[in-house]
Amino acid sequence: MRITVAHRKTKAQAAAAVDRAFVDLSNGLAVGPLTVTVQHQSWSGSTLTFSLVAQMGLLKNPIRGTVEVTDENITIDADLGFLNNLLPEEKVRNIVEMRVRGLLT
């Protein structure tokens, strides 16, 4: 899944917002019965590579991807694993876009 969100921040400010979001995720995020934890994150230039684990009950699902920060956009490329089959892509896209926009305010 690819999601691109335009921003009006400097590239450094946008990257800092993305970094803060992953720090928050490192502390664990619970959305209803779903828990998300960060397994790995590293920056190479303006691209963050990450891996997460989404867990619902006994089911664990790895999520891997990148976040690229440019002067104008934040682009998220993520492989949702089997969650892509369980959740409507449009709903996931809308939630992620809304959260990213919230980071940039």
Image (cartoon, rainbow, N blue to C red):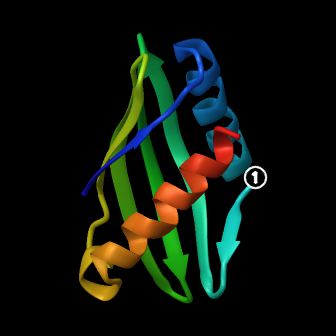
Q: Residue at x 31, y 83 (%)?
A: 88
**In x, y percent, where is residue 94?**
44, 68
Q: Quadrant of residue 10?
A: top right
Q: Residue at x 75, y 52 (%)?
A: 27
**In x, y percent, where is residue 7?**
51, 32
Image quarter where the N terminus lies is bottom left
Name the residue carrying label 1. 27
Query: Could you tell me if residue 71 is visible in this image?
Result: yes
- Compared across the picture, whether 84 is left or right of 27 comes to left
Depth check, front residue: 53 or 96:
96
**In x, y percent, where is residue 41?**
50, 34
Image quarter where the C terminus lies is top right
Tell me the amino acid under the disc marked 1. Asn
Q: Residue at x 59, y 23 (%)?
A: 9
Depth check, front residue: 27 or 95:
95
The extreme front residue here reads 8
- Compared across the picture, whether 46 is left or right of 31 comes to left
Q: Does residue 60 sit above or below 20 in this rendering?
A: below
Helix, strand or loop at mark 1 = loop
Q: Residue at x 51, y 87 (%)?
A: 58
**In x, y percent, where is residue 80?**
31, 64
